[in-house]
Amino acid sequence: MNPFKIFDLPVDFQVDQATLSTRYLALQKSLHPDNFTTHSAQEQRLAMQRSAEVNDALQILKDPILRADSIIAIHTGEQQNIEEKSTNDMAFLMQQMQWREQLEEIENTTKDSDQLMQFTADIEATKKTLLDELSSALSANQWQQAKAINDKLRFIKKLLVEVERVEELLFDF
């Protein structure tokens, strides 16, 4: 599935979110079940399948990691198995361990909300830098580099979920 084709958008990492939203609403309106009440069961089923494809494509295009995966797959013809991925970047592996230890210390020892906010800001800054690097790698058709950066972003995404969990504990949400 090419999510860019579904929304008639250029295959590019930078997606105009307003255009995406407008096209999504138009597609969903055209595929609404009320429009198919007089059609055959097969046509109703096809419209429902198409609607599900549109929803899946929207999720891909809204998430920069999934969007990058899609761009890489479109250009290389390779679907990567995320479950088997692990980075060979030793410096980043060490950074991951350091971040995990730092978060664990904030959660279990210091319980300092200011420290957690600074930690979060540092991770968000790293995420922004990686997104910029990913955009450049994709623009330059550097697929292997883009894959490596995307793997780092996957880790950052998981880490930010952990940060939210710790935040909820500290702030008793």
Image (cartoon, rainbow, N blue to C red):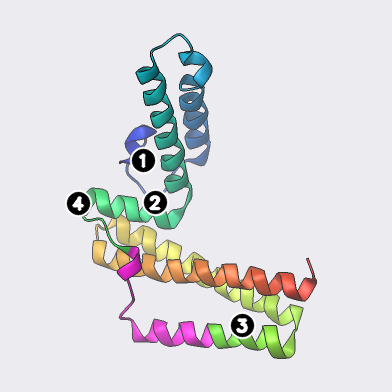
Percent x, y for residue 52?
A: 43, 35
Instruction: Evaluate if marks 2 and 4 touch, with contact meaning CB atoms under 8 Å apart.
Output: no
Residue drawn 54% across the image and 72% down it: 159
Report the span colored magenta: 82-99
Residue ID for mark 4: 77
Distance, label 4 to label 3, CA atoms, is 38 Å
Amino acid carrying mark 1 in the image:
Pro
- Provide the secondary structure element on which disc 1 rests: helix
Pick the front one: 136 or 168: 168
Amino acid carrying mark 4 in the image:
Gly
Pick the front one: 43 or 99: 43
Number of marks in the image? 4
Q: Which mark is residue 3?
A: 1
Q: Which mark is residue 67?
A: 2
Distance, label 3 to label 2, CA atoms, is 28 Å
Distance, label 3 to label 1, CA atoms, is 36 Å
Specify few, some or many for label 1: CA neighbours under 10 Å numbering under 14, 14-19, or 20 or more: many
Q: Residue furthest bottom?
A: 109
Specify few, some or many for label 4: CA neighbours under 10 Å numbering under 14, 14-19, or 20 or more: few
Residue ID for mark 3: 103
Q: Residue furthest left?
A: 77
